[in-house]
Image (tube, rainbow, N blue to C red):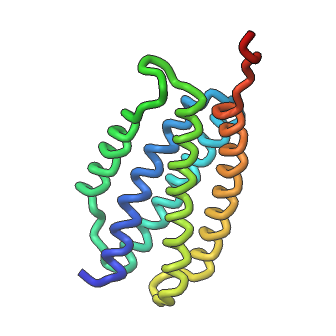
Amino acid sequence: MNPLSHYLRIHLVGAAAGIELAARGRQQLDPATRAMMAELREELKAEQRELREFARRTDTTIPTIGMTLAQVGERLGRLKPNGSLVRRTPLTDLVDLEAMRDAVAGKIAGWQALIAAGDERLDTARLEELLELGERQHDRLTEAHARAAHRALSWRQSPPH
């Protein structure tokens, strides 16, 4: 397999995991973050379709088993400790947003790499648009992360007597 095809396959698997992670956003405690995550998930689905089209143009096979394993792996990732066994906590929101922000940063790096590759089968102008969208997504996630960090890590307890 050529390096470009292998790279596209890696990012297709990552896209599947990112969509699953964004779906968890509907469980966020903050209503504004829930709405942002729902919008982000739809954007990620559209980007995944474009990535599949890039794969088609480069004769890259879609890694269906890898994408399924990524989805399963994301679900297993939900089993992280958060200080509560039975309910979602602000700390869960914070860690989930960090994971999503990391995933979007990886996607941004992917768009940058595909632009740098300069392959004539890929639409550079569209890749640049996708890069800009990824940067806006990262900015929105960073804002949501700051709110979640404040909720999760700001202790407002009265001093002991």
Q: Quadrant of residue 36?
A: top right
* Residue 138, image x, y percentages: 64, 57
Query: Is 80 on the left-hand or right-hand side of 135?
Result: left
Q: Residue furthest front?
A: 161
Q: Is residue 84 above or below residue 35?
A: above
Label tally: 0
Quarter of the image where the C terminus is located: top right
Name the foreground residue: 88 vs 140: 88
Residue located 64% across and 32% down the image = 152
* Residue 68, image x, y percentages: 28, 49
Name the foreground residue: 127 vs 147: 147
* Residue 1, image x, y percentages: 23, 80
Q: Is residue 48 above or below residue 121?
A: above
Q: Residue furthest top?
A: 161
Residue located 50% across and 89% down the image = 118
Residue located 57% across and 82% down the image = 124
Q: Quadrant of residue 64?
A: bottom left
Residue located 35% across and 67% down the image = 10
Q: Is residue 24 above or below residue 3?
A: above
* Residue 53, image x, y percentages: 43, 69
Query: Is 58 on the left-hand or right-hand side of 110?
Result: left
Name the foreground residue: 106 vs 51: 106
